[in-house]
Image (cartoon, coloured by chain):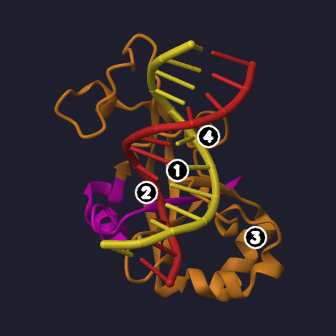
Chain colours: A orange, B red, C yellow
Amino acid sequence: MQHWLMKTEPGTFGIDDLMGRPKQTEPWYGIRNYTARNFMRDGMKNGDQVFLYHSSCPETGIVGIGKVVKEAYPDSSAFDPKSEWFDPKSDPANPRWLMVDVKFVRKFKQVLLLQTLRAHAEALGDFALLRKGNRLSILPVTTEQWNTILALE
DNA sequence: GCCAACGTTGGC
DNA sequence: GCCAACGTTGGC
């Protein structure tokens, strides 16, 4: 099993929204970055666990855990002209963008803040989230990093 | 294929 | 709101 981290903006859709969804599950639509898409397409498998991360908000950091319950399939929002994520270049016969379904697993009692993660940067090694200028919305987490982070909770 | 311009992300 | 960093676009 592999581990990942997925960013989300709580002002738009956060962990509380995920908890409130039917089956506590949501299609992760709207990813418009090739590297992130490739992680979904080539890496993410059913059962993989995911840190849920809140960005662009007062308390940025990891807020809980989810898991992949449906592997990559076409992101239908790319075909919807009314959608904010509409992409006219994505052909339904050859979809450019993909999504996975994520199910809520648990929420941390308190946010594991980015600044806390930074304080343990050495123990985390080369962690994509902490790299300068990191903008990936989906990124891999090694098992070692996963366990180190869980111990910080 | 290069690279400048532009748009977006995301922390602060 | 600012700004650094990065990805994408498009002219050549």
Tell me which residue sits at (52%, 50%) in the image: A68
- Circle 3 residue: A145
**Towards the viewer: A119 or A72:** A119
Q: Nearer the viewer, mark 3 or mark 1?
A: 3
Numbered badge on residue A68: 1
Pointer 2 and pointer 1 on the same chain: yes
Based on the picture, tell me whether residue A137 belongs to the magenta stretch.
no
Gap in Å between the C-alphas at discs 4 and 3? 20 Å
> Dot 1: what SS?
strand
Above or below: residue A9 compared with residue A68: below
Kind of residue indicated by mark 3: Gln
Of labels 1 and 4, earlier in sequence is 4
Point out the tag, 3 or 2, that comes first from the N-terminus: 2
Between C2 and A113, which is closer to the camera in this rendering?
C2
Label 4 lies in what chain? A
Q: Are marks 2 and 1 in contact (CB under 8 Å)?
A: yes
Q: Are marks 4 and 3 in contact (CB under 8 Å)?
A: no
Q: Is residue A128 left or right of residue A88?
A: right
The residue wearing badge 2 is A103
Query: In the rendered image, which quarter contains the C terminus of chain A?
Result: bottom right
Task: Please report, as a chain letter, where disc 3 is located.
Answer: A
Q: Quadrant of residue A132?
A: bottom right
Q: Amino acid at mark 4?
A: Thr
Residue visible at 36% across and 54% down?
A25
Cα separation between marks 4 and 2 = 22 Å
In the image: residue A79, left or right of residue A146: left
Instruction: Choose mark 1 or mark 4, whichever is in front.
Output: 4
